[in-house]
Image (cartoon, rainbow, N blue to C red):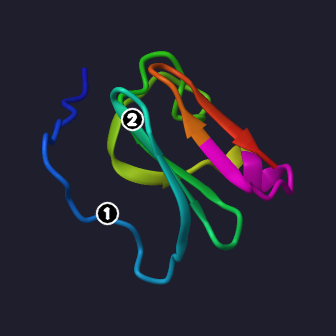
Amino acid sequence: AAFISIQAFPALLDLPQELEVSAVSCGSRHTAVVTRGGELYTWGWGKYGQLGHGNNISSDQARRVEHLVAQGLRVEEVVCGPWTTYIRV
């Protein structure tokens, strides 16, 4: 099982510098951001597939949700729930 650090205080996002974030949402144990280019990045606890990477793997590193890119979808908005992630395209 992957170890996921939990921070009880604000922290800088560790994203590639060229990305401009337009929206962010936090679930109970995961986080998602939308870039100005319409890409979705997620990280945190992934036990229920809420990160959108097609598996239940948790990650401390932000990863782009490749399925959305492959489908040619541009994300406009993201909302995270306790164990879910919803997007508007």
Residue 74's spot in the image, x, y percent? 79, 59
Q: Is residue 24 above or below residue 1?
A: below
Q: Is residue 37 above or below residue 50?
A: below
Residue 68, image x and y in percent? 75, 48
Q: Residue at x 39, y 67 (%)?
A: 15
- The structure residue drawn at horizontal position 81% and vertical position 49%, both measured from the top left corner, is 89
| Residue at disc 1, secondary structure | loop
Q: Mark 2 to mark 1: distance in Å? A: 13 Å
The residue lying furthest to the bottom in this view is 18
Q: Which residue is mark 1?
A: 13
| Circle 2 SS class | strand
Using residue 16 as the reference point, say whether residue 8 is left or right of it. left
Image x and y of residue 79, in percent? 59, 38
Please check the rendered image and state whether residue 74 is part of the magenta-colored stretch, yes or no: yes
Q: Residues within 10 Å of mark 2 (few under 14, many from 20)?
A: many
Q: For this rendering, which residue is in front, 21 or 14?
A: 21
Relative vertical location of residue 3 with respect to residue 64 in this rendering, above or below: above
| Residues drawn in magenta | 68-78
- Identity, as a three-letter code, of the amino acid under mark 2: His
Amino acid on which the number 1 mark rests in the picture: Leu
Q: Going 25% across and 20% down the picture, which residue do you hit?
A: 1
Which one is in front, 65 or 89? 89
1 inside magenta stretch: no
Mark 2 vs 1, N-terminal side: 1
What residue sits right under mark 2 in the picture?
30
Give left or right: position of 31 versus 2.
right
